[in-house]
């Protein structure tokens, strides 16, 4: 999230699209309902009337997979009705930038952007650039009139998304569209804010990233980013998945969102050259320009004394990706199905139920030599070999179970959607022989390390040279029990040497050797600091000689009244609660909305750091620099972007600098009404295996979702009797009209099938799904939860996973599978 | 010494007392439930244990009631003109002098009493078992409790009368349910038709 | 002690069912095996292991979307409690000092009369046949804590507090008259309804069933009047008419 959970209560309009907080983040509804109490409006856009929609002021039904058409129409409405927050757009976004005149858009190229190669299915982005002036900074037109400026191109692109077309694609009635557009467009005023809450309903599409981009454009046009009650807010689906991405558990990033090195970048110098963005814009902070400090400090954290200037700080020991290699989740199972993996750790996960095309995944697991299930329970993955349709005699996979501790049986931090890292304490001892994950890793590490020491082997340095100092060691040097606090401190970072601020005269000591790092501002690229994850630097630190676990703080003060609660735990970065908050003030540093001032420039008060007058009050500002209007030191608000402004034109994505509506891979209509390109031109359907579109055998649009009572694949919640009692069986929700067509009665067993698999489900016939009128045809939509699995309850009465049906195709930027829009058939169950 | 005639055998006597004592126990505990009588409750060791006593007492009552049918049912459903006559003079209980027509083993009043007890007893037992054993169902519970209570009222009205008429109101009756024998002359006065029956059967046996 | 109560506001309930689970957690009740009958309302009714639950109501409408209501169902802690009136076992159902209808399983005799007397069909019976129902977390409220359901509710759809204050709060929020404000001498569980109670699945005019009234007003008096009357009549008869003494000589004469 750019903002945070409590901040939702500050919004004038809460827009929920592609998400369902009442069901899946019920505690967050406290804040949304408080926003309504204050006179705010709740708008929900969803294929069905969800628990959140039941509380909405405006509910707009929309067919799964048509979000971009919906939002495209909204952008057109905002532009046509002059509802943009002009000052914000001109000063803080790239709307005034002039684009390369060779750049062409889907309106001109029938669905494509310029530079498309049909054979490789990729874009050559050389036309997706800005016209530069002599200083190397993009040319601008602050009047926003130049036909090549981003704003005019935006207008041209979305002029095609007329109300009629949008209504026809989404199935949303025109009056509803207008209602939504009007309510959201009204927040373009400086003292009105709109917050958008989204989840997998936006991300799990082949246009997932563009969905989010589209609404980010809306938020930039309306000037809602950086404001209290504004922002673009992902409702993360797990209590600590924010932590998992922060710490680089995805293949393409190292901790702190540093890019994973690639094979053709052989040394640290090349790495920093390639991955450190540069800018000629003097008012841009370009914070990623500090990349070298973070990668070096990371290397010093993991390789400690073994990482020196002479050996490139151990850069050679980091694992590297082949150029262009996609090692994402779907690709893992694709390769596994070809027999390319010997072993697999299913660590705290259940891919046999969570992965798209789960049937194929279960088969692929049989190609492994060994599989380790680190989990609280046995599940469909660990027991894949005796699941339905499996012949154990033909499967050679050896399966191990390592029982692990649950979150209440161990200490540590959990990072929520609002980037808030909260320290949790251990409530009870782990059951039986189960161990916390960190202890299991500790055990594995020392055993592997010992094997390398005894037997040698290929390239042992990356393992043997790791610092692993996180607890008391025994005689052999093995850590007896992992002290998670030491890990937290490693993540925060240390001053390995005395560190000086060389810009001051005389140089000022900012870090004493051996102390915990204050925060990432003091990290160095010369190896004198270490830091396990730069964004968390400052989370476990030292003040006046006292070590403080900032994440364990529980202060309830809220001086701004905006619910920032700055003394409660710790948020990255540097405890900033609302990101891009420099955009919440005008160029002179005065809040756009004085009643909800996130930060405010006080020109006369003395800055304790510099001793000079002028300091920010409120939230931690996005950089201590003075306001933009300051001649000497003023800075632009979007400090993580090299040009310092919000991106309305976004050339960094694989499928286009502007979002364009494409139909899902499996779609109910023959052609894309917007253009000749039916599906996202950059996805590769060949890897998808089986899929069907406009196939009479699978005529209904399906989506997947969650319920309050179960969590993810249900491994934990199906074992909780109180929860299983409330949601005991796999079900499918369908409209009364579809049920009547198919002769299906409420409560009876039906079979739901796609081209990849089928399963039984209990039919829940409901008013809350209604047929859609799309392109003059009636399209029915159904929905399924994905919480069930054949393994438990052991009599199979719960049903199996909806992912047996979902397609094996992902977004071209993130590879997240398109589980939210695919085609199925539904029939009364036989027998 | 009077000549004695056996009016009730051992089985009849034992069964009567099982029935009577269980009935009294059930009435007392039943009353305590109806009026939430705490002292009675604590005498029985608390309401839950009083309920157990009531339940099992009910079993004894039901079984002995069923067995009693072997003793008295046949006689109680046999009516003749003399019974009509008995009714007309209210069994002679509303005067000091009125004589009743000749009666059989059981007089008309006793027959009616038995039938009342039998029907109310079956109703109260059946409803009692439903309350005890059937899983909670609003309709069944309601009906059962109503039947149970209405039958209780019938019983609570009939029993004191029975006790009065079987003891001080008709001296010489109580011993039927203690020794089982009564003086021959007393039997001839109270139940002449029955004595005749017995004599005829005795004579009949002698002749064969 | 001021009368305490619950204020339940379906308009802000999101149907998350934390109340269902929190109650089970506090009372250490087991989960039961259920099947999906075509709705998320599981179990479909209160059970001896489920003291409060959410009732889901889909209100159809001619427009594109209808309404979906979430209504918490539980013991209403009536001011004039039919269950307490009819219970034969003293102390099994009792009024706590906060105004709730508490239960004492040790004193309950399992006669199931309370189910008959309850206008809302609340009492259920556990494996021993003893009454099982919401007791407003009598142990929590006695220690100045909030009942588990109200404590856990994320949006405040279930609020616990001084009954009069809750009524005042609801009126400030725009609810003219609350369901249960006056019915049955004032219900302990008040509902803030926007529409007629029927839409939420509640009785328009809840009342103790006629049979209980009949019970208390007719049957009970009849029993002791009857008993007393009959005993008195017998005594009267003995005095007026005396015993029927048979004389021996007469018998011999008839021979």
Image (tube, coloured by chain):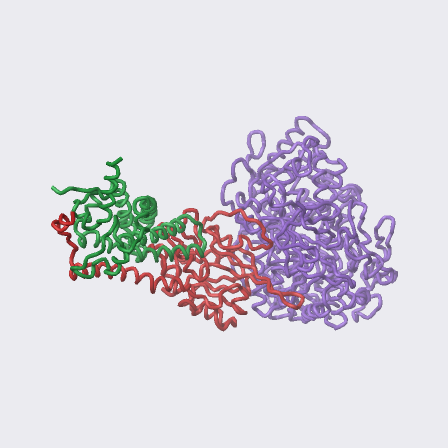
Q: Is residue C16 left or right of residue A143?
A: left
Q: Is residue A139 left or right of residue A633?
A: right
Task: Tell me, yes or no, if residue C138 can be seen here.
Answer: yes
Task: Tell me, yes or no, if residue A622 can be seen here.
Answer: no
Considering depth in this image, is A359 or A773 the residue closer to the camera? A773
| Residue beneath the point at 80% across and 42% down | A264
Residue B125 percent coordinates (x, y): 36, 50
The colour applied to the residues of chain A in this rendering is purple
Considering depth in this image, is B208 or A128 the residue closer to the camera? B208
Q: Which chain is green?
A: B
Considering depth in this image, is A630 or A53 the residue closer to the camera? A53
Considering depth in this image, is B39 or A301 the residue closer to the camera? B39
Q: How many marks?
A: 0
Residue A247 percent coordinates (x, y): 65, 47
Q: Is residue A317 left or right of residue B198?
A: right
Q: Residue furthest top?
A: A455
| Residue beneath the point at 41% across and 64% down | C208
In what quadrant of the picture does the C terminus of chain A appear? top right
In what quadrant of the picture does the N terminus of chain A appear? bottom right
Residue A744 percent coordinates (x, y): 66, 54
Tell me the quarter of the picture where residue A661 sits. bottom right
Residue B16 percent coordinates (x, y): 27, 45
Q: Residue furthest front?
A: B207
Q: Which chain is red?
A: C
């Amino acid at each position: 999230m750019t903002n945070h959970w409590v901040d939702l209560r500050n919004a004038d309009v809460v827009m929920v699209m592609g998400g369902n907080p009442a069901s899946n983040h019920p505690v967050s509804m406290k804040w949304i309902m408080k926003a309504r109490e204050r006179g705010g409006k709740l708008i929900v856009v969803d294929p069905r009337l969800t628990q959140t929609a039941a509380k909405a002021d405006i509910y707009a039904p929309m067919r799964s997979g048509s979000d971009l058409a919906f939002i495209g129409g909204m952008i057109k409405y905002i532009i046509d009705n002059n509802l943009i927050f002009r000052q914000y757009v001109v000063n803080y976004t790239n709307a005034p930038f002039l684009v390369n005149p060779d750049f062409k858009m889907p309106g001109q190229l029938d669905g494509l952007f310029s530079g498309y190669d049909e054979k490789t299915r990729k874009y050559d982005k050389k036309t997706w650039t800005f016209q530069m002036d002599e200083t190397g900074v993009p040319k601008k037109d602050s009047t926003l009139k130049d036909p090549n400026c981003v704003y005019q191109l935006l207008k041209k692109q979305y002029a095609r998304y007329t109300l009629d077309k949008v209504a026809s694609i989404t199935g949303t009635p025109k009056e509803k569209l207008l209602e939504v557009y009007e309510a959201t467009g009204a927040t373009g005023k400086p003292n009105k804010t709109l917050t958008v809450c989204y989840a997998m309903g936006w991300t799990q599409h082949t246009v997932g990233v563009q969905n989010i981009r589209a609404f980010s454009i809306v938020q930039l046009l309306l000037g809602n980013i950086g404001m209290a009650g504004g922002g673009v807010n992902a409702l993360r689906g797990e209590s600590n998945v924010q932590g998992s991405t922060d710490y680089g558990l995805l293949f393409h990033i190292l901790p702190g969102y540093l890019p994973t090195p690639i094979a053709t970048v052989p040394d640290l110098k090349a790495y920093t050259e390639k991955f450190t963005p540069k800018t000629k814009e003097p008012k841009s902070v370009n914070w990623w320009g500090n990349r070298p400090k973070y990668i070096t400090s990371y290397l010093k954290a993991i390789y400690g004394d073994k990482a020196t200037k002479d050996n490139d700080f151990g850069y050679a020991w980091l694992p590297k990706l082949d150029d262009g290699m996609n090692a994402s989740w779907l690709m893992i199972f694709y390769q596994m199905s070809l027999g390319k993996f010997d072993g697999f750790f299913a660590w705290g996960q259940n891919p046999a139920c969570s992965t798209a095309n789960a049937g194929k995944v279960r088969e692929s697991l049989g190609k492994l030599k060994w599989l380790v299930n680190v989990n609280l329970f046995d599940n469909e993955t660990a027991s894949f070999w005796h699941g339905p349709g499996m012949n154990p005699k033909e499967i050679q996979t050896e399966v191990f179970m390592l029982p692990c501790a649950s979150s209440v049986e161990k200490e540590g931090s959990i990072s929520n959607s609002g980037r808030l890292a909260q320290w949790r304490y251990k409530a009870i001892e782990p059951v039986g022989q189960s161990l916390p994950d960190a202890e299991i890793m500790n055990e594995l590490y020392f055993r592997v390390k010992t094997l390398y020491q005894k037997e040698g082997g290929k390239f042992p340095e990356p393992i043997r040279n790791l610092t692993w100092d996180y607890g008391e060691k025994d005689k052999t040097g093995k850590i007896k029990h992992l002290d998670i606090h030491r890990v937290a401190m490693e993540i925060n970072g240390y001053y390995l040497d005395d560190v000086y601020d060389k810009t001051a005269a005389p140089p000022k000591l900012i870090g004493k050797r051996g102390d915990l790092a204050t925060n990432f501002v003091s990290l160095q690229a010369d190896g004198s600091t270490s830091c396990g994850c730069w964004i968390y630097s400052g989370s476990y630190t030292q003040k006046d000689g006292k070590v403080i676990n900032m994440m364990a703080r529980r202060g309830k003060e809220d001086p701004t009244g905006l619910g920032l609660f700055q003394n409660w735990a710790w948020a990255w970065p540097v405890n900033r609660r609302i990101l891009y908050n420099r955009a919440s003030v005008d160029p002179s540093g005065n809040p756009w909305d004085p009643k909800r001032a996130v930060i405010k420039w006080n020109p006369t008060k003395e800055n304790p750091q510099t001793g000079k007058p002028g300091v920010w009050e409120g939230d931690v500002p996005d950089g201590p620099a003075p306001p933009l209007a300051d001649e000497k030191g003023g800075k632009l608000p979007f400090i993580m972007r090299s040009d310092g402004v919000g991106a309305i034109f976004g050339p960094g994505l694989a499928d286009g600098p502007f979002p364009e509506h494409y139909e899902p891979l499996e779609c109910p209509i023959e052609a894309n009404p917007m253009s000749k390109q039916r599906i996202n031109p950059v996805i590769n359907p060949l890897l998808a295996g089986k899929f069907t579109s406009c196939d009479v055998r699978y005529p209904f649009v399906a989506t997947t979702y969650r319920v309050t009572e179960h969590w993810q694949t249900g491994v934990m919640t199906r074992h909780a009797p109180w929860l299983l009692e409330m949601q005991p069986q796999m079900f499918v929700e369908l409209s009364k009209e579809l049920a009547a067509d198919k002769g299906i009665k409420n409560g009876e067993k039906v079979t739901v099938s796609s081209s990849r698999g089928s399963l039984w489900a209990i039919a829940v016939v409901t008013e809350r799904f209604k047929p859609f009128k799309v392109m003059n045809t009636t399209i029915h939509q159904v929905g399924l939860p994905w919480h069930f699995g054949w393994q438990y309850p052991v009599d199979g009465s719960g049903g199996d996973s909806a992912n047996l049906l979902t397609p094996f195709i992902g977004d071209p930027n993130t590879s997240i599978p398109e589980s939210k829009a695919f085609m199925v058939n539904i029939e009364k169950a036989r027998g | 010494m009077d000549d004695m005639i056996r009016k009730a055998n051992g089985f009849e006597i034992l069964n009567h007392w099982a029935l009577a004592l269980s009935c009294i126990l059930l009435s007392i505990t039943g009353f305590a439930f109806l009026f939430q009588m705490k002292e009675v409750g604590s005498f029985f060791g608390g309401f839950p244990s009083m309920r157990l006593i009531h339940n099992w007492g009910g079993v004894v009552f039901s079984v002995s009631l069923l067995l009693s049918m072997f003793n008295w049912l046949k006689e109680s459903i046999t009516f003749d003109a003399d019974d009509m006559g008995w009714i007309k003079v209210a069994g002679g209980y509303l005067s000091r002098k009125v004589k009743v027509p000749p009666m059989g083993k059981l007089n008309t009043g006793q027959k009616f009493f038995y039938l009342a007890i039998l029907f109310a007893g079956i109703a109260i037992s059946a409803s009692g078992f439903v309350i005890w054993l059937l899983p909670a169902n609003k309709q069944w519970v309601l009906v059962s409790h109503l039947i149970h209570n209405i039958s209780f009222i019938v019983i609570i009205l009939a029993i004191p009368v029975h006790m009065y008429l079987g003891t001080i109101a008709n001296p010489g009756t109580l011993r039927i349910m203690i020794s089982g024998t009564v003086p021959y002359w007393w039997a001839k006065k109270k139940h002449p038709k029955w004595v005749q029956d017995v004599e005829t059967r005795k004579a009949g046996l002698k002749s064969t | 002690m001021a009368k305490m109560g619950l204020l339940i506001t379906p308009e802000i309930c999101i149907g998350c069912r934390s109340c269902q689970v929190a109650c089970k957690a506090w009372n250490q009740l087991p989960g039961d095996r259920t099947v999906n009958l075509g709705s998320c309302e599981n179990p479909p009714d209160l059970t001896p292991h489920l003291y409060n639950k959410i009732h889901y109501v889909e209100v159809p409408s001619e427009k594109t979307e209808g309404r979906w209501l979430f209504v918490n169902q539980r013991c209403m802690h009536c001011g004039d409690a039919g269950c307490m009136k009819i219970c034969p076992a003293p102390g099994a159902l009792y009024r706590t000092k906060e105004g709730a209808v508490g239960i004492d399983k040790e004193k309950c005799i399992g006669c199931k009369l309370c189910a008959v007397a309850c206008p809302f069909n609340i009492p259920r019976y556990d494996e021993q046949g003893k009454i099982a129902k919401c007791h407003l977390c009598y142990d929590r409220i006695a220690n100045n804590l909030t009942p588990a359901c109200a404590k856990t509710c994320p949006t405040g759809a279930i609020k616990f507090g001084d009954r009069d204050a809750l009524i005042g709060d609801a009126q400030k929020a725009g609810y003219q008259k609350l369901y249960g404000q006056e019915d049955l001498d004032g219900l302990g569980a008040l509902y803030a309804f926007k529409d007629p109670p029927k839409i939420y699945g509640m009785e328009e005019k809840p009342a103790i069933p006629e049979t209980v009234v009949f019970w208390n007003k007719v049957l009970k008096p009849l029993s002791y009047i009857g008993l007393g009357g009959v005993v008195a009549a017998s005594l009267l008869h003995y005095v007026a008419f005396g015993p029927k003494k048979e004389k021996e000589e007469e018998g011999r004469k008839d021979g």
